[in-house]
Image (tube, rainbow, N blue to C red):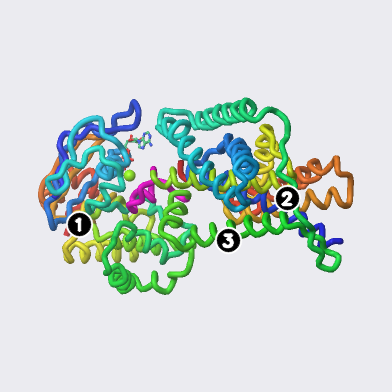
Amino acid sequence: MLLQQVVNGLTLGSTYAIIALGYTLIFGVLNIVNMAHGEIFMIGAFVGLMLVTKLQTGIFTALAGAMLTGAVLGYLLERIALRPLRRREVSHLAPLISTIGVSIFLESLALKIFGPQAQSFPPVFSGQLFELGTLKISIIQIVILAVSFGLMIALRFWLAKTKMGKSIRATAENLETAGLLGVNTSQVIIVTVMLASGLGSVAGVLVGLAFNAVEPTMGITMGFKGLAVLILGGLGNITGAMVGGLLLGIAEVFSVAYGESSYREAVAFGLIIILLFIRPQGLFGSGSAQGGR
Amino acid sequence: MLSIRQLVAGYGSITALKSIDLTVPEGSIVSLIGANGAGKTTTMKTIMGLIRPTSGEICFQDQNITGQPVHQVVSKGVSLVPEGRSILSQMSVLENLEMGAYLRRDREVQHDLQKVFQRFPILEERKQQLGGTLSGGQQQMLAIGRALMARPKLLLLDEPSMGLAPLVVAEIFKVIQEINQEGTTILLVEQNVRQALKIAHYAYVLETGRMVLHGPADAVANDPKILEAYLGGRRVG
Ligand SMILES: Nc1ncnc2c1ncn2[C@@H]1O[C@H](COP(=O)(O)OP(=O)(O)O)[C@@H](O)[C@H]1O
Ligand SMILES: [Mg+2]
């Protein structure tokens, strides 16, 4: 029973982690919170759903399609809403406002195209259950766990070992220093926003599958969870986003299993508030604010 | 190698550089001295393309590099060791040095890494440690080593001796001279005027955004005004 809840918690939490990684990556290099991330997540969910229902593709094609769409949206977001504001004279709150603008636009667009009702994946995807002793696990859960943990491990490795990954880390730590080492920081910023948005869109498909519901407003709730994880893990900290996401997922599942399901969000966010009293910088955050602009 | 003509630059409404001229001949050490707030760091940042000048011209090896983005200036062969070192504290010493060679595609990066380790053996001992865990002097060595990994033709150093113990300062100045003797041209900003004039061939004196004096380093060192203002009245030996 306990193991079952842990597995359920990890499944949910791994999707939170993927969403939070998107916020974290962008916060790292730009020191801003991308308020459009939740809506890019939502669009990703719809793209996945459309690929599966309208084009009868498999789940992995749907995930890849969502990721690609997310990356394209990330590119546009950077070009239209972020880059023009990256000048000294502009208030540092400006990108916050412009990304809110993009989020409203994307949500309205989704409402117009897809309507307000929640839509679900075809029954094939609700999947059969495997029983391993007392543990029950669905194909969907396995897909979610495999894809999110696979992405987390790949991202870790990529950031640690590749030249591009290192240039992102250098830019996140200090934009000016990275430039002085020859890093084209404008290019790094574009790549980071595309990557973050691609991850967000994949998370959209995973969450859509997990709850078997895709709707235009899903970006708001999940966006706030991702933001909570960003703060819980420590602003801009990759490990923090991963661990924080998993913890939030487990906390939610446990509060449903052993408590009152209507309190699930209250419990989870209550825990975050308590934790931030003890460690205001978040689980893995360092004392001082870091990151370039 | 580097020539700056009538450069005006600043921050918003503040004009920090009011038309300065400066020339760095190939193979030399040129010292730029001046009090706090004179505009030395602004000069360095403007050369690197971190600050866009209001007017004027910066030429490096007869190419106009005015207003180019910093990574392109670096790719032409100019590197800056900035004031306050700016080590990447979340990256290891080795990663910091590797990042120094970010733009290089040749096969001699490993060879140059060994050269840096020979020059600063402490960096090899600490290569797996995070940059942020090094002492001030070690960070300065890392910052210089990292800049050398780019194989710059022109190396800019902004107050490399700031905040360091006298023995470490002496070592840093020795290393700067060695780097120069191995063929790298150097523009050195210092508040440690005595030492800076001792190793330089040529010197410029900046005061509130204006170049007030320049000439061969020994001439500048014996200028009565400089003796008075920067050297406490004593001659450089
Ligand atoms: N980021 C900044 N914003 C506004 N003014 C600045 C900034 N940096 C430096 N200044 C001003 O520009 C002038 C030159 O500064 P700086 O180049 O740092 O001097 P130095 O390196 O010689 O001590 C000073 O008056 C300083 O106050
Ligand atoms: Mg300075």
Q: Where does the magenta region start and end?
A: A173-186
Spot the residue most to the right.
A259
- Asked if marks 3 and 2 touch (Cβ < 8 Å), the reply is no
Q: Which residue is mark 3?
A: A153
Q: Residues within 10 Å of mark 1 (few under 14, many from 20)?
A: some
Is label 2 within 8 A of ligand 1 (CB to nearest ligand atom)? no
How far from the left and from the top, in percent, is residue A89? 41, 28
Q: Which amino acid type is marked by label 3?
A: Ile
Could you say which disc has been placed on residue A124 in the image? Answer: 2
In front of the other: B15 or A252? A252
Q: Using the image, name the chain to which the residue with label 1 belongs.
A: B
Answer yes or no: are tags 3 and 2 on the same subunit.
yes
* Location of residue A163 (image quadrant): bottom left
Question: Which SS does the magenta portion mostly show?
Answer: helix
Q: Which amino acid type is marked by label 1?
A: Lys
Could you say which disc has been placed on residue B184 in the image? Answer: none
Secondary element at tag 3: helix
Q: Which amino acid type is marked by label 2?
A: Val
User: In the image, is residue A120 above or below residue B196?
Assistant: above
In front of the other: A119 or A271? A119
Q: Residues within 10 Å of mark 3 (few under 14, many from 20)?
A: few
Q: Which residue is mark 1?
A: B153
